Image (cartoon, rainbow, N blue to C red):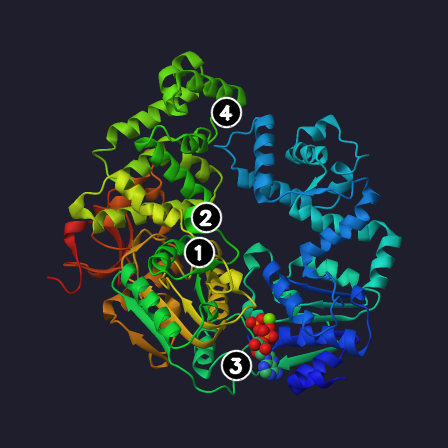
Amino acid sequence: MTGFLQDLNTRQREAVQATEGRIRVIAGAGTGKTKALTYRYAYLVNVLGIDPANILCLTFTNKAASEMRQRIATMVRSGDYNDFVCTLHGFCVKFLRKEIYRLGFPKSFTILDEEDSKALAKECMDELGLKRTEKTVRQFLEGIATEKALNGYIEAFMLPQSQVSDAMRAGNLACFTARQMKQWALDFDDLMNFTLFILDRFEDARTAWQEALNYIMVDEAQDCNLDDWNLIERLAARHHNLFIVGDPDQCIYEWRGAKPARFVEFAADKDIFLDENYRSTPKILDIANCVIANNRNRIPKDLFTRRAEGRPVIHFHGKTESEEMDWLTGQIRTLIAGGAALRDIAILYRSTWQSRALEQALLNAGLNYAIWGGTRFFERREIKDTLAYLRLLVQPDDDVSFLRVINTPSRKLGRTFLDALKGIALREDCSLYRALLAHHAELGKARASVFVALVEDGRAHVDTATVSDLANRILEGSGYKKALREDQDEERLENLDELLASMRFYERSHAEEEPTLVEYLQDIALYTNADYREDAGSLKIMTVHQAKGLEFPYVFITGLSEGIFPNMRTIREWKKNGEEEERRLMYVAITRAEKALFLTESEGYNVATKMSKYPSRFLDEIRRDMVVLEGSIPESLWRGTRNMVHVLDEEHYMPEIQPLAEVSGDGFAADRAAYNSPFSLGETVVHDIFGEGVILSANDDFSSFQVRFSDGSTRFLRAPFLHRPDLP
Ligand code: ATP
Ligand code: MG
């Protein structure tokens, strides 16, 4: 009956069979934690005869939960695993569906996603007369979250019987919750808070759930935040059968409030340590151990494996991004020719904007791919909006593009206005834009006229300006970027930066033909209308965060440049802790690989730092004899990396550099200046009198640079007085 336990090692078996009490498994990546947990589930059901309705099995992402459900399904009788294998928020939803009636809410309450919450926040800000220039939507929502973290808001604001006084009503929270209550809507914080509230206030509910959940298991427990812990502990308070597994080296959500200390300090009746990695070859594991050893804030542990040596880990350095992409697709073809299946391959990157180059390369190479937990680059809203504007410039009869952008960003041109416009277009048998062009004055909407002026200005420049200039003109002129900046929507801004950078690349690589906007749009249509199937036969591309807990035979980690991975913003905001979290993320990325690992990066323009690219510090931390280098890296690039580390860590760089990219009016000019800058951030330069120094920052037009010299002094110097060490 317990034959299936033969698949496990002694300590895993011990973990499976220790069903009673508080058990903690602490172990590194790929040591079979999740495997032990799923086998434990099967053991409880198959051997002890526990009803699955009495087992709660929690994990972190939807992907991981569905993976776990699949693993369990293969081991228990069909129909024998229920949906208590879920994420924490998933559990809250199930809980509330049964219990929320106690608070006077309907069982069919709705859930606000991030976009819904933003929309509600904007309505509130308008109602309260809060200017977006003074407070961003994100700050408003952060304020709401902070208020909701304090006790008492549910009773004060969110129950049908709540007495909201006039004084309270003037506050942000009252305004926001009133709108929520109108549609019985809960945001993500509410899901957790309501669950805790009900467990707290209703003894019968608490007893019933504590009684029912005989066994509770939590995967990836290092990423739980305090609320998560409170919920888990409360649910386990009757039976005390709590099984948690985790790896402090893989905590990658501290920026969202994860409290790995709670995992480390957990009062366990029994601890189980696993140290044999079954996933990766020794070469891959050595690299993972080597990188993570640089974190000071950790409990040292090393993993070993008995797997065969396997292939060497390859670090490819390209002179350009295209070279990096060509090499990557070439390697994939070689793998396929050697018998690998596409579904065995995963490509990981740090930030979503990085998928652009990758997706274009894969589409060009005819390699079928799926993005996990994300949207394809050319399907992202901000990219589609920009391209729709550009299309309208060359094709004023394109109603689809017109409708996409007429109110993007919001110009408050409502349904009545659009209906009137449609009426005119129908009468005059013309497109919506042409109708607007001819009649905007009489329609009496100032903002509609501004829109016409914007499009006409773009149209007047179509033959003379470059594609990227046109795009930038529109993005700045329409207020599109400004709205994103006000929302602090870094991800979308990064995607737009990446789009502009790719347009500039397009212009450079087609310089001789002087490509027109029409030609650009035709060429890009290949990517925007890409016909694809997301099936088992596709390779996977995803951010490292999405890859947590998963494994793939062949893993590529791309874009390993300083400032990209590690992410510059994380280091800037969180300093040393940020660096360590980025390193844990790198550890997660490396340890996803089973048979082969490829690390790639290239020289060129760095969208993140708006400067030149240097190899990531994490590559520098890997002993050179542990990887095979393909492509040659001049020593000066490694020097660049080290200088960059110095500069990023010392925080000298941002105040001067960052605003440049966002100079009001024409961000692109600054961007381009950055691109043409004679020196890069962190580069070593020589001054004839002061000697060798490092570039810390630059002035607006990159004609002067702040340099720190070896004696620690810093000076602003004009560019012609500085030169590179290897030049006279
Ligand atoms: P992570 O930290 O990345 O979440 P993990 O510790 O949860 O990793 P698993 O995903 O459970 O590790 O296991 C890693 C791989 O090793 C899986 O392919 C699993 O099937 C295999 N494995 C685990 N334990 C054993 C074992 N005792 N014998 C053989 N293979 C095993
Ligand atoms: Mg796992």
Q: Amino acid at mark 3?
A: Asp
Q: CA distance from mark 4 to mark 1?
A: 33 Å
The N terminus, quarter of image: bottom right
Foreground: disc 3 or disc 2:
2
Foreground: disc 4 or disc 1:
4
User: Quarter of the image holding residue 635?
Assistant: bottom left
Asked which secondary structure carries label 1, the reply is: loop
Q: Amino acid at mark 2?
A: Glu
Foreground: disc 2 or disc 4:
4
Q: Counting residues from the N terminus, which is met first, the one under dot 1 or under dot 3? A: 3
Q: CA distance from mark 2 to mark 1?
A: 8 Å
Foreground: disc 4 or disc 3:
4
What is the number of the mark on residue 351?
A: 1
Q: Is residue 563 above or below residue 463?
A: below
Q: CA distance from mark 1 to mark 3?
A: 28 Å
Q: Amino acid at mark 4?
A: Lys
Q: CA distance from mark 3 to mark 2?
A: 35 Å
Asked which secondary structure carries label 4, the reply is: loop
Does the rendering let one see residue 700? no
Residue holding disc 2: 491
Q: Quadrant of ligand 1?
A: bottom right
Asked which secondary structure carries label 3, the reply is: loop
What is the number of the mark on residue 302?
A: 3
Q: CA distance from mark 2 to mark 4?
A: 25 Å
Q: Counting residues from the N terminus, which is met first, the one under dot 4 or under dot 3? A: 3
Left or right: 130, with 212 as reference point: left
- Which residue occupies the foreground of this view, 567 or 366? 366
Residue 698: percent from left, percent from top = 27, 48
Residue holding disc 4: 412
What is the number of the mark on residue 449?
A: none
CB atoms at circles 2 and 4 under 8 Å apart?
no
Q: Residue at x 50, y 32 (%)?
A: 132
